[in-house]
Image: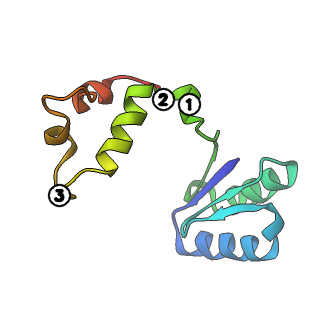
Amino acid sequence: MLLVVTYSRAARQTLRNACEAHEETVVRRLGRAALFEETEFGAFLALRLRAEYGVDVQVERTDPLNEFEAVPEGVREAAEAYADREHASTPYAKFAAGDDHPDPAAMKDREL
């Protein structure tokens, strides 16, 4: 997919117009950003915006996250356990302390 992020009012308006005119190419709209299908036409729309607005438009190629290939099982289990915690206000570091869940500081240093 192609992620298009806009940083000016004019670029946002043009992005909205492009999304409305070409819904079949839009995977998802996100306010100041949109995900386009990774097709030549999706690239055309993204590059047209960047050509018109320069640095006010950022274009990135993205890959969907396959959590079962890229994320260690312990991290997935910790995320599920944390989502089901008893008290919603408990921060993760306190939740994970003294348990088998990954340490937040260690996770910040490890790449997927």
Tell me which corner region of the image, top left, top right, bottom left or bottom right, holds residue 81.
Answer: top left
Q: The disc labelled 3 sits on which kind of residue?
A: Ser
Q: Is residue 111 above or below residue 31?
A: above
Q: Is residue 50 above or below residue 91?
A: below
Residue nearest the viewer, comparing 9 with 75: 75
Left or right for 44, reference 69: right
Left or right for 109, reference 91: right
Residue at 54%, 67% in the rendered image? 32
Label 3 crowd (10 A; few <14 / some 14-19 / many >=20): few
Residue at 63%, 77% in the rendered image? 13
Which residue is label 1 attached to? 68
Distance from Cα at disc 3 to Cα at disc 2 = 25 Å
Label 1 crowd (10 A; few <14 / some 14-19 / many >=20): few
Which residue is label 3 attached to? 89
Tell me which corner region of the image, top left, top right, bottom left or bottom right, holds residue 89.
Answer: bottom left
Distance from Cα at disc 1 to Cα at disc 3 = 28 Å
Label 2 crowd (10 A; few <14 / some 14-19 / many >=20): few
For marks 1 and 3 on the same chain, the one whose residue lies earlier in the sequence: 1
